[in-house]
Amino acid sequence: MYGYAGNILRVDLSCGKVSYEPLTEELVHNYIGGRGFGAYYVYKEVPAGADPYGPDNILVFASGPFAGLFLPSGAKTSISAKSPATGLYGDSNIGGHLAGELKYAGIDAIIVGGKAQTPSYLLIDDDRVEIRGADHIWGQGAIKAEEVLKEELGDEFQIATIGPAGETGVVFACINHDLGRQAGRCGMGAVMGSKNLKAIAVRGTRGVPVADIAGLKNVATNMFRELLANPGLKAWQDLGLAQVTTWANSIAALPTRNFRQNFYEDVNGLSGELMKDTIVVGDKACFACPMATGKLCKASFRGKTVLVEGPEYETTALIGSNCALRSIEEVAFANYVCDELGLDTISAGNVVAFAM
Ligand code: SF4
């Protein structure tokens, strides 16, 4: 099937069994990929009344037909499960480089079920699939654990990890990838932790079947040309989502002091422009994306200096103005703490603001 690897990888952590099943044309035509695949499998396979933290819940990692091809907007991996935050279907997606790597390893989706007896991680190296022990990274921060696995396995592996929040079942635990990108919403990290699954590491070396290479190249060229000519592009490249903060304040829509207010008088201390001028040290892009909206920042707090991707608008709004912080550097540092713990910054900011 063109645009797809043609395989679903099924992993049962309870019995340690891994198997492949073919991707069907019916699934592709009805659900396309990514979130569609996740919703299909979660509704079909998770029994009614299943505990989101129980072995009957499944965690689905799925890419779409653009993944792994030289096209913008195909970099997302969708992660789906029954959500511990809502008790309903949930999904969250993550950029970076995981989706293409899964495709290169011959996989359109991974369905993880059951629960490992001990901390584990899933290694996928083309056709070699192993469930390995993860005692040495259990308890470590999500980014630290990714660094350790990169060191052990090689930089070409694309890795998704959880932090201590996922291990201990915090309902808004996220999944980290690419040293600072997160699938933040719906507690997908808590589902991963409930399965004793600390990480997934993937390396693939295959191509993606394409029906008309010349036609695809033509479409890709036009997409890049239009994107690069768009007058709005520069602001995204310069500031990423952080450009939204002052705009949201200007229309009285910035969450402030636990949502009791919608306008923040100290917004200039949190602006994307100030962030760019003071703490941004580089740009990061997802696979084949010319926008590079990821902003790598250096932030110091009480004598400790860290590198962190972000903060984006949502983090600045919920941890910044909603908690009445006045400094973008403090927000960036809090962003780093959340990333290492494996906490979704939106919900973390909300909880802290509520407690204040
Ligand atoms: S770099 Fe930014 S715009 Fe591009 S795919 Fe990633 S998140 Fe989206």
Image (spheres, grey):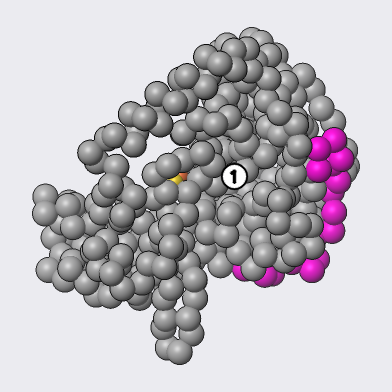
What residue do we see at 52% from left, 22% from top?
A: 217
- Residue farthest toward the bottom in the current orientation of the protein: 303
Front position in the image: 265 or 260: 265
Check if residue 136 falls in the magenta segment.
Answer: yes
What residue do we see at 45% from left, 89% from top?
A: 303
What residue do we see at 29% from left, 42% from top?
A: 233
- In the picture shown, does residue 79 fall above or below 132? above
- In the picture shown, does residue 285 fall above or below 152? above
With 108 as the anchor, is 229 left or right in this view? Answer: left
Front position in the image: 81 or 229: 229
Which quadrant contains ligand 1?
Answer: top left
**Residue designated by label 1:** 97
Front position in the image: 322 or 169: 322
Q: Which residues are magenta?
A: 125-141
Q: Quadrant location of the C terminus?
A: bottom left
Q: Is residue 102 at all visible to an observer of this figure?
A: yes
Q: Is residue 49 at all visible to an observer of this figure?
A: no
Describe the element under mark 1 as helix, strand or loop: loop
Q: Quadrant location of the N terminus?
A: top right
Q: Position of residue 333 (x, y in %)?
A: 42, 73
